[in-house]
Amino acid sequence: MGFELEEQEVNKLLLEMDPISLQQLDGVQLLNRVDSKFVFHFKHFPDILKELQPHYNVLDIDGRRMFNYESLYFDTHDYLLYRFHHSGRPNRVKVRYRRYMDSGLTFFEVKYKVNGLRTDKKRFRESTIFDTLRDREKELIYHKYLNNDDLEKKLWIRFKRITLAGKDLPERATLDLNICFDNFSKEAGFPQLVIAEVKQDKSSVFSPMIQAFKKRHFEQIGFSKYTTGVALLEPIKHNAFKPNLIKIKKILHGNT
């Protein structure tokens, strides 16, 4: 019951915030940016939003301010792309379809991590999510150690997302909640976890959101939905991700 009441309060607070359109949001250019991720319990979210209201606009599309997403990730039979991430390989890739469920828009996306620093994303519009990759999708994927014909569907991830943009600072943030993982035989999820990713211009030295997190002693964390879902659901080596899983367990049990 408490969680339901908090979600209602979050929705109420979002409606009280000043809106920003998708076109306006695209105008918030962050060409030289730094990304920071934080994870915290949903129970803190209403109080944090109250602090952030004067400083941020919220993305509004046709009156909606919280949006439903679903992604289907692809990997090889032996999880080569997951293992790239686990081993800390500086050049790695993620392959997925993403559907914006409220609008019905679907994209095929390939995300490249270059030298462990820069993230490049390539994508194109699709009519739907396909269970297998076609030639058109495979042509978008390149990694010297990957055979694109070996890629197969591995994991569904579904979540809700809120997007904020700074009023006075070049800053954007996504807040993801109610995350569910599904590997076609088992499901797991973090319904009471919020994953915040703050994107700042490197020239900016102040962020009201990061200040709100630090005041509550939230730790900055490296978090990947895909690798976390695989680590939770598959009998696969995940030593490198254990510290994050331990932190999440502590958060969910109210120890932080």
Image: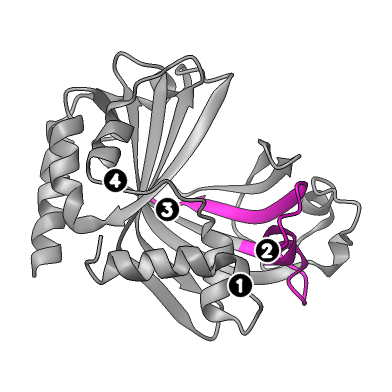
Provide residue 100's location: percent of width, then percent of height.
Answer: 46, 49
Three-letter amino acid code of the residue under disc 3: Met
Q: Earlier in the sequence, mark 4 or mark 1?
A: 4
Q: Quadrant of residue 224?
A: bottom right
Q: Is residue 35 left or right of residue 39?
A: right
Three-letter amino acid code of the residue under disc 4: Met
Q: Is residue 147 left or right of residue 211?
A: right
Provide residue 54's location: percent of width, then percent of height.
Answer: 17, 23
Residue 147 against residue 213 in the figure, above or below: below
Q: Is residue 149 left or right of residue 33?
A: right
Please tell me the numbered disc located at residue 101: 3
Provide residue 41's location: percent of width, then percent of height.
Answer: 26, 58
Q: At numbered mark 2, what does the secondary structure look like: helix, strand or loop?
A: helix
Calculate the distance from the C-alpha at mark 2 to the C-alpha at mark 4. 31 Å
Residue 207 against residue 179 in the figure, above or below: above
Q: At numbered mark 1, what does the secondary structure look like: helix, strand or loop?
A: helix
Which of the two discs, 1 and 3, sits closer to the camera? 1
Calculate the distance from the C-alpha at mark 1 to the C-alpha at mark 3. 34 Å
Chain part drawn in magenta:
73-102
Asked if the stretch drawn in magenta spans residue 68, the answer is: no
Calculate the distance from the C-alpha at mark 2 to the C-alpha at mark 3. 30 Å
Residue pictured at 45% horizontal, 79% vertical: 187
Of 214 and 65, nearer the camera is 214
Residue 60: in sight, yes or no? no
Please tell me the numbered disc located at residue 86: 2
Of 48 and 68, nearer the camera is 48
- The residue that disc 4 covers is 66
Which of the two discs, 2 and 1, sits closer to the camera? 1
Three-letter amino acid code of the residue under disc 2: His
Q: Bin the neighbour count of mark 3 within 10 Å (Cα to Cα): few under 14, some 14-19, many 20 and up.
A: some
Asked if the stretch drawn in magenta spans residue 75, the answer is: yes
